[in-house]
Each structure stands twice: as structure tokens, then as C-alpha cells.
Image (cartoon, grey):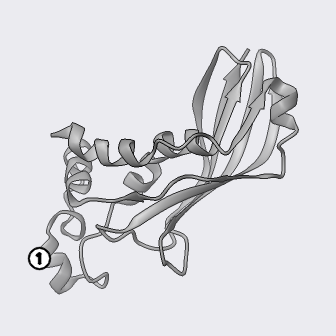
Amino acid sequence: MVESANQTVHEEAEQMAQTTADGVEGVQGLVGQHLGHSDWVTITQEQVNQFAEATGDHQWIHVDPERATNESPFGGPIAHGYLTLSLLPSLMPQIVEITGFRMGVNYGTEKVRFPSPVPVGARVRAGATLEAATPFEGGIQMNLAVTVETEGGSKPAMVATVVYRRYL
């Protein structure tokens, strides 16, 4: 069952990166630039349920569509905030491709906020700006301002500063 919910994101996430950079100098040349947007992906109830299973977060606003429709202020079930954050590994490669390094890792986040909910059935996409590129012994650290927006939404669903490291 895990494959079908993830398949929705994977199938919709086939776009090539909008921005490419090679090596330390190429990354540093992108500082301050908006790197682009991912494709839109649909958030399904199946994804939300699977995320609840994986994390143990079975709060009814996520997993009980009937109750969420009748009792929540959101008018229906919503995705977990951390589910929205967890989409970044599939969305970021559509935005930026970095070459000239032997490997890259997710180094963490500086700040994450969820200003508005993501209703089940909504489409979301990510956009990113490279805020900083700091060389270190053996590579470069990249701080990116990432915004996930909901199609037609008035406020972002998520704003975060994510940190990646690329190793030479």
C-alpha cells in the first residue's frame, strides 16, 4: 500500500530541475537567487493515513474525514505539518540540481513554520531561494528558504530554512 500514495508524488514529480549548479563556485553563484518551483502534487487521504501510521500521529483532524468535516475549523481533514515538510526530498530535485560533489545530505532545518493547513485533496508545490552557501573543509553548506504553497491558498502552507551539505 505504501507504494500507491508515494506513487502520486513520484508520478507528479518527474520535472527536471529548473536550476543547476556545478561545484562550490557554481553553488556560490546562486546565493540570493530564487531557484524555481516544483510541480504541483496532490495530497491524498491515503498519504495522510500512511503518515499517521508511520509517525503514530492519529489525531482525528488528519485521519477521520467525517469528524474533521463536521467538527474541525478546517472543513475537512488536513495533512500533518510534518508530512508537508517530508515532501521536500521529492520536490527539491525538481527545483535545483547540484553536480560536482560525491554526495549530499540533509543537514537539518533552522526554522519551520506551518502558517496554513493543507486540506486533503489540495495540490501543493515548493519554491526555494538559496540564502547562503558556506564552504567548509570538504564541501559546502547550503541554506535554502523553502516555501510550500497550496494551490489557490492565500498564505503559505509551510515556510522553512533547510540546510543541505554537499561533499567533494
Q: Residues within 10 Å of mark 1 (few under 14, many from 20)?
A: some
* SS for dot 1: helix
> Which of the 4 quarters of the picture holds residue 21?
top right
Q: What residue type is disc 1 on?
A: Glu
Question: Which image quarter is the N terminus in?
Answer: top left
Is residue 3 or residue 89 the one in the foreground?
Answer: 3
Q: Is residue 151 above or below residue 101?
A: below
Give the number of marks.
1
From the viewer's side, name the closer residue of 21 and 85: 21
Relative horizontal placement of residue 155, taking residue 2 as reference (left or right) = right
User: Quick one: 163 or 11, which is closer to the camera?
Assistant: 11
| Vertical relation: 125 (above or below) 119 | above
Who's the residue at 19% across and 57% down the image?
A: 58
Residue at 57% across, 38% down: 93
Residue linked to disc 1: 66
- Residue depicted at x 26% and y 49%: 51
x%, y% of residue 135?
83, 27
Q: Quadrant of residue 18?
A: top right
Q: Is residue 114 left or right of residue 22?
A: left
Where does residue 118 sit, x and y in percent of width and height? 39, 68
Residue 74 vs 130, above or below: the answer is: below
**Residue 47 location, x and y as percent?**
26, 52
Q: Which quadrant holds the C terminus?
A: top right
Query: Where is residue 137 drawn, in percent x and y?
Result: 81, 17
What residue is shown at x 62% (from left), y 45% (from top)? 95
